[in-house]
Image (cartoon, rainbow, N blue to C red):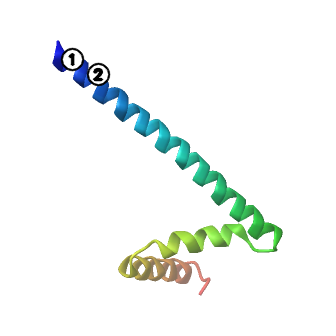
């Protein structure tokens, strides 16, 4: 019986931690949205900014591979 109570307490604590983290995640997402809105208001292209953020997360070899593939596709379509 004691094990069940301990497990229930542990489960409740884990759920509460997840809920707090989800709240923090939403707050951070709202902050990011505000930064993009500020950038847009200052004349920046947010779609391009998002692409740059995504690219900066990549490792060099991944970025090189993506660049090579993009160039291959552009050449195949006569866009190079």
Going by the image, does 79 lie left or right of 61? right
Front-most of 53 and 9?
Answer: 9
Which percent across, then down, holds residue 70?
A: 50, 78
The image quadrant where one finds the C terminus is bottom right
Front-most of 80 and 62?
Answer: 62
Going by the image, does 78 lie left or right of 20? right
Q: Residue furthest top?
A: 1
Front-most of 24 and 71?
Answer: 24
Going by the image, does 49 lie left or right of 12? right
In the depicted structure, whether residue 25 falls above or below residue 33: above
The residue shown at (69%, 64%) is 35
Which type of secondary structure does the marked residue at label 1 adopt? helix
Which percent across, then down, holds residue 68?
A: 44, 82
Q: Please count the marks in the image.
A: 2
Q: Which mark is residue 47?
A: none
Q: Which mark is residue 8?
A: 2
Which percent across, then down, holds residue 58?
A: 43, 73
10 Å crowding of disc 2: few (<14), some (14-19), many (20+): few
Quarter of the view holding residue 60: bottom left
Q: Which residue is mark 1?
A: 4
Quarter of the view holding residue 5: top left
The image quadrant where one finds the N terminus is top left
Which type of secondary structure does the marked residue at label 2 adopt? helix
Are dots 1 and 2 in contact, CB under 8 Å? yes
Front-most of 22 and 79?
Answer: 22
In the depicted structure, whether residue 32 falls above or below residue 70: above
Quarter of the view holding residue 17: top left
In the depicted structure, whether residue 64 falls above or below residue 45: below
Q: CA distance from mark 1 to mark 2?
A: 6 Å
The residue shown at (64%, 59%) is 32
10 Å crowding of disc 1: few (<14), some (14-19), many (20+): few
């Amino acid at each position: 019986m004691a094990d069940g109570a301990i497990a229930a307490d542990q489960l409740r604590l884990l759920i509460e931690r997840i809920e707090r983290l989800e709240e923090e995640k939403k707050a951070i997402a709202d902050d990011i949205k505000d930064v993009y809105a500020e950038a847009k208001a200052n004349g920046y292209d947010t779609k391009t900014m998002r692409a740059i953020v995504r690219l900066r997360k990549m490792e060099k070899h991944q970025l090189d591979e993506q660049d090579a593939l993009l160039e291959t596709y552009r050449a195949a379509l006569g866009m190079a």
